Image (cartoon, rainbow, N blue to C red):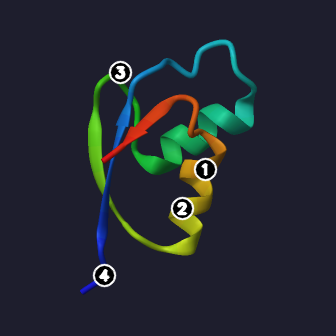
Amino acid sequence: MADKIKVTLVKSGIGYNKKIRETLRGLGLTKLHKTVELENTPAIRGMIKKVSFLVKIG
């Protein structure tokens, strides 16, 4: 069983370019303060790194 990562959206994606907003949606983060548990894979870590200034990990 792979590790899980908890990611919480703490800042809105409004005002950022389309790729940032689509990355948030791909992670399942649609509303502020929503927390999702994701698999710890290289693809997911890359998506988190791309939007790291909008999310909290942990």
Residue at x 54%, y 61% (from the top left corner): 45
Rendered image: mark on residue 45: 2
* In this view, the mark in front (3 or 4): 4
- The image shows residue 16, relative to residue 22, as above or below, that is above
Q: What is the quadrant of the N terminus in the image? A: bottom left
Front position in the image: 3 or 30 = 3
Q: Residues within 10 Å of mark 3 (few under 14, many from 20)?
A: some
Front position in the image: 26 or 46 = 46
Residue at x 52%, y 29% (from the top left corner): 54
The span from disc 2 to disc 4 (Cα, nearest Å) is 13 Å
Task: Estimate the x, y position of residue 27 in percent, counting from the top left.
Answer: 46, 49
Q: Quadrant of residue 29?
A: top left
* Circle 3: residue type: Leu
| Marks 3 and 2 close (CB-CB < 8 Å) | no
Looking at the image, which residue sits at the far bottom?
1
Helix or strand or loop: what does disc 1 sit on? helix
Taking the image as shown, residue 30 lies to the left or right of residue 34, namely right
Q: Residues within 10 Å of mark 2 (few under 14, many from 20)?
A: some
Rendered image: mark on residue 32: 3
Q: Name the residue under label 4.
A: 2
Ranked by sequence position, the earlier of labels 4 and 1 is 4
Residue at x 66%, y 45% (from the top left corner): 50
The span from disc 4 to disc 1 (Cα, nearest Å) is 19 Å
| Marks 1 and 2 close (CB-CB < 8 Å) | yes
Q: Mark 1 points at which residue?
A: 49
Residue at x 29%, y 47% (from the top left corner): 36
Task: Estimate the x, y position of residue 11 in percent, counting from the top left.
Answer: 47, 19
* Circle 1: residue type: Lys
